[in-house]
Structures are given as structure tokens and as C-alpha cells.
């Protein structure tokens, strides 16, 4: 099930980043071998009670002059309307109601997106409580008084946000069992060309999926009587002049599209090879347990011999070493080379994501593996694996019951993962492990 996306918008200095950190927690250290994922605080995976959601901060570079504040806020609001399920609009009780707040609220109201109004810097209810009423004038519902800096009212705010998650489960997107594919990658690698080519060759039936809260236009392509939903990420190009802003928006779009997808196609330009930025984008999909296909595009421009594919694959695998399971394909959106094969790969990856392994067979593989290579030990205690079972799909997730959790080293877990992959494949999808102690 795709997680809801919550976006924070508001004027500069109202406390967006402070609120973001209050909800997401302080920046944690970089997740092991996934580059660049938790370093930038544009988005964070959060939990409130038993609900998971993705929080995004649309605020980028702060404008220097007040006359650009409004246009920047409009841009932020557009991004939020386009990508989020719930928008948190944050204002500042000390500055009171400001004209630009009202103008942005007009946009939000028209969008019909769920909006929660937060009035920040209410550090003391006794002192500022009455000033909160003024914000009813915005006409977007009850203001929630918070103090992001002292973490007051955050629970009430999240309760108000979570009310809007409930209805999401009833939407058609959740019942829709068509493969959902996000085509992601840096600008100019050929994302739009691939979509155009696919839709040109295959009949497009609908452009809008009824009942979703998204305004994004998804493209449905029919191949072999199977419908595939391509989630739009390339569509909108922001006109912002600030490089950091453009980057921020493209990350937001990528995160929210990947969130909704089953399979992610990471497009890279054959002439450039794989870059750090590609690795960052790949990390977003890896973290979310999505299926991954690396499509090396513009293959028509490469002079080839019988080693070229091998060399390219090795180079990419080196940079994307945290996802050795990724599938590869070498394509040309220009000539259409191997685009048909892309559908076959999508089918394979989807099947692997939903593969279920019988407990008996799984435990046979694991006990064979532990015989071939003894589990690690520490201070005279050796890891014992009692039992394993698959508890989820998309991505396939296994619970392993052990005697002492700490003894399960990353490298041994990797070893077990490799053994499971040798036996069952799981090509194109990450698999997850949950280690539980059982005395
Ligand atoms: P942003 O520009 O909207 O991201 O705002 P920041 O989060 O950077 O906050 C702007 C300023 O407001 C900083 O100096 C914060 O310390 C301050 N601030 C944020 N939240 C609160 C709050 O709840 N109370 C008070 N008094 N100050 C706050
Ligand atoms: P996007 O920004 O990732 O959507 O990239 P576009 O689809 O707009 O493509 C960027 C440029 O690369 C355009 O000029 C395309 O014509 C060109 N291009 C895309 N795919 C191919 C390809 O397979 N071969 C060649 N030679 N050019 C391509």
C-alpha cells in the first residue's frame, strides 16, 4: 500500500523546518550503504501512532526580497497540491495574518486538497491563545495552535492530518491491481521520450484515473492485453531560476511518484554512465522496497563491441552496489530498441515482488546455509537461527527468529539473503529481514 504524502508549506521563517524536524525527529545518520537518502531533509519517512507517511518540506531557498515571497509561496503550494495527499499550511501567530497567507489559501481552497492549518509559535496559550482565532478568517478550517520549537500541539496537529489518511484506503488506487510504474532519472536522460514511444506504439485508453486525490496525469499503456499505469514524473518542468529549487522539486516529484509505484525504472544516459545523482535517485526506490529496473537509454549513440554491455553493467553495479538485485536493460527511445522487452522485465519484477515462499522450503534453505557457513559468534555466544517465515510481499519480507539479535551481523544477513536469492531469484526486487529474538 502506498504511503500518504504530507507537505508542509508556509512563508519564510514561520517555522517550517522546525516543524519538519519536530515531526521527523532530528536528522539521523546516513542509512548504511544507501547514499544521500537521509542526508537532505527534503523528505522523511514518519510514523504517527500506527500510521506511516512521507513528510515533505516544499520550502527551498529563501527569497531575498518580499515581493518574490508570494510567487515563491505560490510555487510551493502548486508542488504541494500536485504531489501531496494532505497539506499542512503553517502560519506565525506573532506576525499575525498576512496578505500572502490569504492569497495562498485561495489556491489551496480551490484545489480541494485536504489542508490542515497550523498556527505556530504559540509558545504560551495564556499569552497567545486568543490571537489564534484570527486565523479562522483564512476559511480553511480550525487552526491548530502549535509551538514547533517546544514541540507543543504536534500530536493534535498530526491527529488532524491523520483524519485525512483514513479515506485513502477506500480509493481505487488501492484496489487497482494494474502494474504501476514510475520512470525516474535526471533531466534529459530520455524519460519523456520513453513514455511517448511506449504510448505511441501502444494504444492509450485513459489519461486520468478516477477517484485518486492526485491531479497528476497517469498514462495507461496496453501491452499484450495487460494495462500498465505509468506515473508521470517528467511532465512538469519548473521555471524556477534557482538551481537548488529545481533540484528540490525534482526530488519531491521523484519521492512521491516512487511512493505510488510498484516498479521503478531508473533511466540513465548511456553517454554519461551512472552518476552520484543517479545513485541518490536509486536509493529512494531501494529504501521503499520497490522493484528496480535500470534502463540504459540512448544505446543507439554508443559504439559497441562484444564487451560493451558487460562493461556498462559492471560500472553501474559498482555505483549501485547497495542494490545488486537491480535488473538491467539497454534501450533506445529513439529507435524503439528493446522497448518491448521492457514490458517483459516489468512483469518479471512484479511477479518477484509478490512471490511467496513456503515456510518449509525457506527453512530448508536457511538450515543448509547455516551448515555451509556457521553463524557468527561473540564472547562465546553463537547466533542460533530457530525459524524463518515470510510475512509480507512488495517487498518480500522475512521474519527470522534468533537467540540473540545483536549477533546477526550485517554480513551474515547478506549471506543469507544471497542464499535465498540463489534459491528463489527475487530478481529486480529488494527483500527485507526482520530479526526477532525468541528465548
Ligand atoms: P522556515 O523558514 O519556515 O523553515 O522557519 P524555521 O523553521 O527556520 O524557523 C524560523 C525561526 O522561527 C527560527 O529562528 C526558529 O527558531 C523560530 N521558531 C520556529 N518555531 C518556533 C516556535 O514554535 N516558537 C518560537 N518562539 N520560535 C520558533
Ligand atoms: P527527460 O528530460 O528525461 O524527459 O528527457 P527527454 O525525453 O526530453 O530527452 C532529452 C533529449 O534526449 C531529447 O533531445 C531526446 O530527443 C533525446 N533522446 C531521448 N532518448 C534518446 C535515445 O534513445 N537516443 C537518442 N539518440 N536520443 C534520445
Image: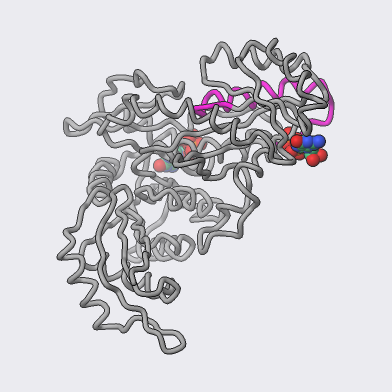
Figure check: 25 above or below 95: below
Looking at the magenta stretch, what is its main secondary structure? helix
- The answer to whether residue 243 is visible is no
Residue at coordinates 34% horizontally, 41% vertically from top-left?
A: 262
- The answer to whether residue 251 is visible is yes
Examine the structure image and report whether residue 186 is included in the region drawn in magenta.
no
Q: Residue 53: x percent and y percent?
A: 49, 39
Rendered-image quadrant of the C terminus:
bottom left
Figure check: 79 above or below 336: above
Q: Which residues are magenta?
A: 60-87
Q: Residue 154: x percent and y percent?
A: 63, 36
Give left or right: position of 322 versus 145: left
Figure check: 30 above or below 165: below
Examine the structure image and report whether residue 68 is included in the region drawn in magenta.
yes
Residue at coordinates 50% horizontally, 43% vertically from top-left?
A: 47
Give left or right: position of 149 versus 48: right
> Looking at the image, which is closer to me, 195 or 16?
16
Residue at coordinates 76% horizontally, 30% vertically from top-left?
A: 122
Amino acid at each position: 500500500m502506498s504511503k500518504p504524502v504530507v507537505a508542509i508549506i508556509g512563508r519564510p521563517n514561520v517555522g517550517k523546518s522546525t516543524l519538519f524536524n519536530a515531526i521527523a525527529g532530528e536528522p539521523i545518520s546516513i542509512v548504511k550503504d544507501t547514499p544521500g537518502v537521509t542526508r537532505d531533509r527534503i523528505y522523511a519517512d514518519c510514523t504517527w501512532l500506527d500510521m506511516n507517511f512521507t513528510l515533505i518540506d516544499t520550502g527551498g531557498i529563501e527569497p531575498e526580497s518580499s515581493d518574490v515571497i508570494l510567487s515563491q509561496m505560490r510555487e510551493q503550494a502548486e508542488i504541494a497540491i500536485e504531489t501531496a495527499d494532505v497539506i499542512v499550511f503553517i502560519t506565525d501567530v506573532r506576525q499575525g495574518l498576512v496578505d500572502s497567507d490569504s492569497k495562498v489559501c485561495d489556491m489551496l481552497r480551490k484545489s480541494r486538497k485536504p489542508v490542515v492549518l497550523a498556527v505556530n509559535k504559540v509558545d504560551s496559550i495564556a499569552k497567545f491563545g486568543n490571537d489564534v482565532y484570527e486565523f479562522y478568517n483564512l476559511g480553511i478550517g480550525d487552526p491548530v495552535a502549535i509551538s514547533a520549537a517546544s514541540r507543543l500541539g504536534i500530536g493534535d496537529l498530526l491527529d488532524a492530518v491523520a483524519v485525512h489518511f483514513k479515506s485513502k484506503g477506500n480509493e481505487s488506487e488501492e484496489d487497482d491491481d494494474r502494474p504501476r510504474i514510475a520512470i525516474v532519472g535526471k533531466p534529459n536522460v530520455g524519460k519523456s521520450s520513453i513514455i511517448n514511444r511506449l504510448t505511441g506504439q501502444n494504444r492509450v485508453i485513459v489519461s486520468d484515473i478516477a477517484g485518486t486525490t492526485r491531479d497528476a496525469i497517469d498514462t495507461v499503456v496496453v501491452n499484450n492485453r495487460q494495462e500498465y499505469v505509468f506515473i508521470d514524473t517528467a511532465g512538469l518542468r519548473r521555471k524556477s531560476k534557482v538551481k537548488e529549487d529545481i533540484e528540490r522539486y525534482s526530488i519531491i516529484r521523484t519521492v512521491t511518484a516512487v511512493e505510488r509505484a510498484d516498479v521503478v525504472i531508473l533511466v540513465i544516459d548511456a553517454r554519461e554512465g551512472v552518476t552520484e545523482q543517479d545513485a541518490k535517485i536509486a536509493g529512494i526506490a531501494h529504501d521503499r522496497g520497490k522493484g528496480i529496473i535500470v534502463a540504459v537509454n540512448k544505446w543507439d549513440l554508443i559504439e559497441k563491441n562484444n564487451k560493451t554491455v558487460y562493461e556498462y553493467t559492471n560500472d553501474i553495479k559498482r555505483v549501485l552496489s547497495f542494490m545488486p538485485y537491480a535488473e538491467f536493460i539497454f534501450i533506445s527511445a529513439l529507435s524503439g530498441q528493446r522497448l518491448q522487452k521492457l514490458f517483459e522485465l516489468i512483469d518479471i519484477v512484479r511477479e518477484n515482488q509478490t512471490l511467496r515462499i513456503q515456510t518449509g522450503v525457506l527453512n530448508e534453505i536457511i538450515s543448509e546455509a547455516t551448515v555451509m557457513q556457521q553463524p557468527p559468534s561473540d564472547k562465546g555466544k553463537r547466533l542460533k537461527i530457530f525459524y524463518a517465515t515470510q510475512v509480507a510481499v512488495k517487498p518480500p519480507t522475512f521474519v527470522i527468529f534468533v537467540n540473540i539479535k545483536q549477533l546477526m551481523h550485517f554480513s551474515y544477513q547478506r549471506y543469507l539473503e544471497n542464499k535465498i536469492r540463489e534459491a528463489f531469484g527475487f530478481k529486480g526486487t529488494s527483500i527485507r529481514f526482520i530479526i526477532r529474538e525468541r528465548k
